[in-house]
Amino acid sequence: MCVTCGCGNDQNTRLIEVGRPHSHGHSHSHSHDHDHDHDHDHDGHVFATGHEYLATVATTETLVLEERVLAKNDALAEANRRWLHSRHAMAVNLMSSPGSGKTTLLERTIRELGSTLTMSVIEGDQETTFDAERIRAAGAPVLQINTGAGCHLDAVMVETALRTLDPARGIVLIENVGNLVCPALFDLGEDVRVVIVSVTEGADKPLKYPHIFVSATVVLLNKVDLLPYVDFDVQSFERDVVRLNANAPVLPVSATRGDGLAAWYTWLSRRAPGRGSDRPRFRDESTAT
Ligand SMILES: Nc1nc2c(ncn2[C@@H]2O[C@H](COP(=O)(O)OP(=O)(O)OP(=O)(O)O)[C@@H](O)[C@H]2O)c(=O)[nH]1
Ligand SMILES: [Zn+2]
Ligand SMILES: [Zn+2]
């Protein structure tokens, strides 16, 4: 269950190796027990009463549950990070709204940087293996996680995926479920958080959804090829990102036309294990001579 929005059911999560036949480990029964109290007064406020009352009385319990779920997730994420570092690999968590261009950016990055940087991919979507098939065609090892009703990936899902993927030294790119809200709360064991916004979404996103920007390592502004056709104030977007997180550079890119991708490749390559000067210092290296 997502502690942010209360949706989802982890039992429906599926791990799929694209290209191999798979069987469903669960039945597709979708009958729900839905016996809430609906004290409708039929004045048009049809979702009131039962849910609002439950929300009030459950606040304390929800907060305790939220803390426990997140603490457990954080511990597992730390274990994922250590496991990756022990094999000279690191994870990059890509987060955005649906359709901002995560898979397009990954496809192009794999095609254009794959000869100099070892990359593998974990794809997160509620349903389908569409994205994993695109990544496979681009030439990288990939594993698809389908979260069912889940709105984000978590450290348990990534741990399972990592053990199946068995990534080599290099970078594991994790495309999170398209959602600008819940993924922000869940550390997956990554060293780098990439937040992607496309210019068609509007420049107000940092102020409306601040949490994901506060935790970003870098912000990519995608689809800049469409700037002539949309009302998007790049300067105010950049100003708002800096206000929330002065450490996260904003890189304007077009994943389809190629604008700004050289800067993205340089930024990413510098952070890869065994490269550049400002890459993360891994514990097993800091003691090495
Ligand atoms: N014009 C333009 N279109 C783009 C760009 N990047 C991606 N697109 C288009 O945007 C649409 C969505 O791209 P995806 O890469 O599938 O987006 P996504 O973030 O992976 O989507 P989800 O996995 O559904 O969350 C596709 O039609 C892409 O071709 C870009 O830089 N410019
Ligand atoms: Zn959620
Ligand atoms: Zn995608």
Image (tube, rainbow, N blue to C red):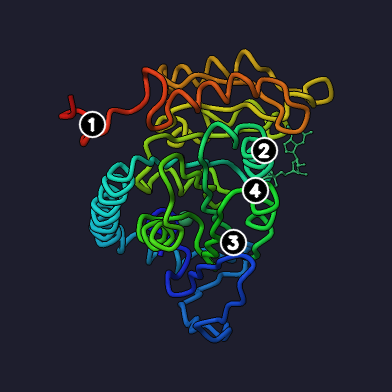
Q: Which mark is residue 45?
A: 3
**Dividing the picture into quarters, in which one does residue 200 lie?**
top right
Q: Amino acid at mark 2?
A: Arg
Q: Closer to the observer: label 3 or label 1?
A: 1
For the point 59% across and 61% down, the residue is: 45
Front residue (pair 228, 273): 273
Task: Tell me if mark 1 has few (under 14), some (14-19) or many (20+) residues whose alpha carbon lies within 10 angstroms of its own.
Answer: few
Q: Amino acid at mark 1?
A: Glu
Secondary element at image label 4: loop
For the point 32% across and 45% down, the residue is: 87
Cβ–Cβ under 8 Å for marks 1 and 2: no
Q: CA distance from mark 1 to mark 2?
A: 30 Å
Point out the image quarter for the C terminus. top left
Front residue (pair 51, 148): 148
* Residue on which disc 4 sits: 139
For the point 38% across and 48% down, the residue is: 188
